[in-house]
Amino acid sequence: MAVKRLTVYARQNEQSALFKAFKKLILLKKAGRFTKALAGYKLSVVEVSSKAKLQKLDDEERVTLFSNDGSELLPIVTLDNQIIKRGSFLSPKELSQLFDGLSLQIDDKKE
């Protein structure tokens, strides 16, 4: 089974509930939870602080991130270096569709 790479590119210090939920999903996967639903996926986050940080990405990642006019719109979600969402994070419904019905409850209360 080929492993699919799901990557979220977000601004440094991003605080949205959906972003925090995705980071929590990564931690749960590392802890051995949701093994069936997340099988075959490598989940990662790239926090981008500036264009200088983007220069450190490999060529394929950089090409993926920038539109033809050279400007980025974060957040960007990619699956195997193909953009699947730009300008917002994956919703619980989209995550459920991607991960075999995995159901997430996201607490969006301010801390």
Image (cartoon, helix red, strand yellow):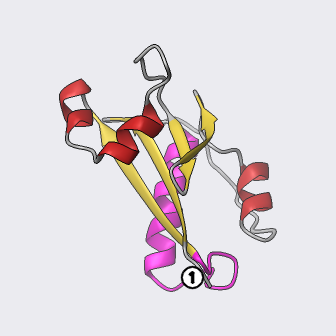
The secondary structure type at the circle numbered 1 is loop
Residue 57 horizontal/vertical position (percent): 27, 44
**Quarter containing the C terminus:** top left
Classify residue 103 as left or right of residue 73: right
Measuring 77% from the left and 60% from the top, which residue is drawn there?
96
Which of the pair 100/4 is nearer the observer? Answer: 4
In magenta stretch: residue 39: yes
Measuring 57% from the left and 82% from the top, which residue is drawn there?
33
Residue 14 seen in render: no
In magenta stretch: residue 42: no
Q: Amino acid at mark 1?
A: Arg
Q: Is residue 38 above or below residue 52?
A: below
Classify residue 57 as left or right of residue 103: left
Residue 100 seen in render: yes
Classify residue 42 as left or right of residue 2: left
Disc 1 packing (10 Å; few <14; some 14–19; many ≥20): few
Measuring 43% from the left and 59% from the top, which residue is drawn there?
44
Residue 9 horizontal/vertical position (percent): 43, 41
Measuring 47% from the left and 39% from the top, which residue is drawn there?
64
Q: Which residues are magenta?
A: 17-40
Which of the pair 56/49 is nearer the observer? Answer: 56
Residue 77 horizontal/vertical position (percent): 55, 43
Q: Is residue 42 above or below residue 2?
A: above
Q: Residue under circle 1?
A: 33
